[in-house]
Amino acid sequence: MGSVDLVLAVVAAAANLAVAAVLLARTGGGTAVPRIFGRPQPFPRLRAAMHGCLGLGMGVGWLVKDVFPPHSVGDVVLFNVIRILLVAGLVTALLAAFLHTRSSRDEAAR
């Protein structure tokens, strides 16, 4: 793994996990909608799960991809775990997007 790949993997993991931590910290354990850069972030726990999955899938997966030899059992297991994390991140992103647009339409109708 080259130095650029290492830096990109660390940045991807750190940035996504930092956003997840900020979202969880700003909710305060309640139903408050936190603001990041002045914009409200609806469904903060769902978004935190998305960023956690993406950070672990992209960043950490990229870092440990060279630990196991190609086509070994460990490599296959790691590949499947990373695939599951990325699919979970995609599903939570789609859920947050669709739930947010639905709630906006309901508020506009009132």
Image (cartoon, rainbow, N blue to C red):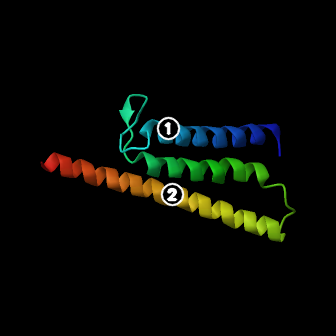
Q: On screen, 19 above or below 73? A: above
Q: Residues within 10 Å of mark 2 (few under 14, many from 20)?
A: some
- Tell me which residue sits at (67%, 64%) in the image: 81
Q: Earlier in the sequence, mark 1 or mark 2?
A: 1
Residue 90 badge: 2
In the displayed structure, does residue 94 sit left or right of residue 19? left
- Tell me which residue sits at (52%, 52%) in the image: 49
Report helix, strand or loop for mark 2: helix
Location of residue 5 in the rendering, given as x and y in whole percent from the top left corner: 76, 42
Question: Farthest residue in the right direction?
Answer: 69
Q: Residues within 10 Å of mark 1 (few under 14, many from 20)?
A: few
- Tell me which residue sits at (51%, 36%) in the image: 22
Residue 109 badge: none
Location of residue 95 in the rendering, given as x and y in whole percent from the top left corner: 40, 57
In the displayed structure, does residue 95 sit left or right of residue 107? right
Question: Farthest residue in the top direction?
Answer: 38
- Tell me which residue sits at (54%, 47%) in the image: 51
Q: Mark 1 touching mark 2, by CB under 8 A? A: no
Q: Nearer the viewer's eye, disc 1 or disc 2? A: 1
In the displayed structure, does residue 43 sit left or right of residue 89? left
Report helix, strand or loop for mark 1: helix
Location of residue 106 in the rendering, given as x and y in whole percent from the top left corner: 20, 52
Report, in whole angstroms, how far the alpha carbon at label 1 lies from the one at label 2. 22 Å
Residue 25 badge: 1
